[in-house]
Image (cartoon, helix red, strand yellow):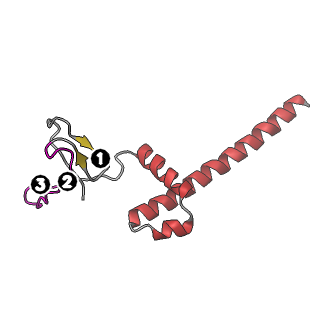
Amino acid sequence: GKSFGAVGVAGLAPAGPHHFCGGVGGGESVQVPVPPRVAVVLHYECCSFPRWRRKYAQLAASHSPADTDAVPFEFYRASIRLAAALVAARDANAEEAAVAEAEAEAAAAA
């Protein structure tokens, strides 16, 4: 699940995506189940495309195909694979652009 806290509580600070620390309780993590009839947290994996692209490009760079297959969430697996394809396409286009630029420079020098 996700965490929430009252932003007005002195000393309360986020401790990763699933916890807060400080504030009431002297820094101990306190978990209190909240039923859906009381509150629902709407969670968006990535709130923008640039953030999604950055996050999953980083994960793609650090995950082999076997590592990706072991990720327990389908959205993550699909996103890592898609980001890897986007990075590969970008890199291929960068190589093509560099070759074309070098050929243009050579032609200009001749």
Q: Residue furthest left?
A: 38
Residue under label 3: 39
Q: Position of residue 68 (x, y in %)?
A: 50, 65
Say whether marks 2 and 1 touch (CB < 8 Å): no
Local secondary structure at mark 2: loop
Q: Position of residue 104 (x, y in %)?
A: 80, 35
Which residue in the protein does label 1 denote? 15
- The answer for how far apart the CA atoms under marks 2 and 1 are is 17 Å
Q: Crowdedness of circle 1 by 10 Å Cα count: few (<14), some, many (20+)?
A: few
Say which residue appears at 45% left-offset and 49% top-offset.
Answer: 55
List the residue tagged with mark 2.
41
User: Which of these two is toward me, 14 or 26?
Assistant: 26
Q: Earlier in the sequence, mark 2 or mark 1?
A: 1
Badges 3 and 1: C-beta atoms under 8 Å apart? Answer: no
Q: Measure the alpha-carbon separation of dots 3 and 1.
A: 21 Å
- Give the crowd class for mark 3: few <14, some 14-19, many >=20 residues within 10 Å: few
Residue 31 painted magenta: yes
Sequence order check: which comes first, mark 3 or mark 1? Answer: 1
Residue sitting farthest toward the right: 110
Query: Bounds of the magenta span?
Result: 24-40
Principal secondary structure, stretch drawn in magenta:
loop
Residue located at (40% from left, 67% from top) = 74
Q: Quadrant of the C terminus?
A: top right
Position in image of residue 17 (x %, y %): 30, 51
In the image, what residue occupies the spot 73% across and 41% down?
A: 98
Instruction: Check disc 2: other Cα within 10 Å, few if <14, some if 14-19, many if 20+.
Output: few
Disc 1 residue type (three-letter): Ala
Amino acid type shown at disc 3:
Ala
Q: Secondary structure at mark 1?
A: loop
Are the residues tagged 3 and 2 within 8 Å (C-beta)? yes
Q: Is residue 108 above or below residue 12?
A: above
Residue type, numbered disc 2: Val
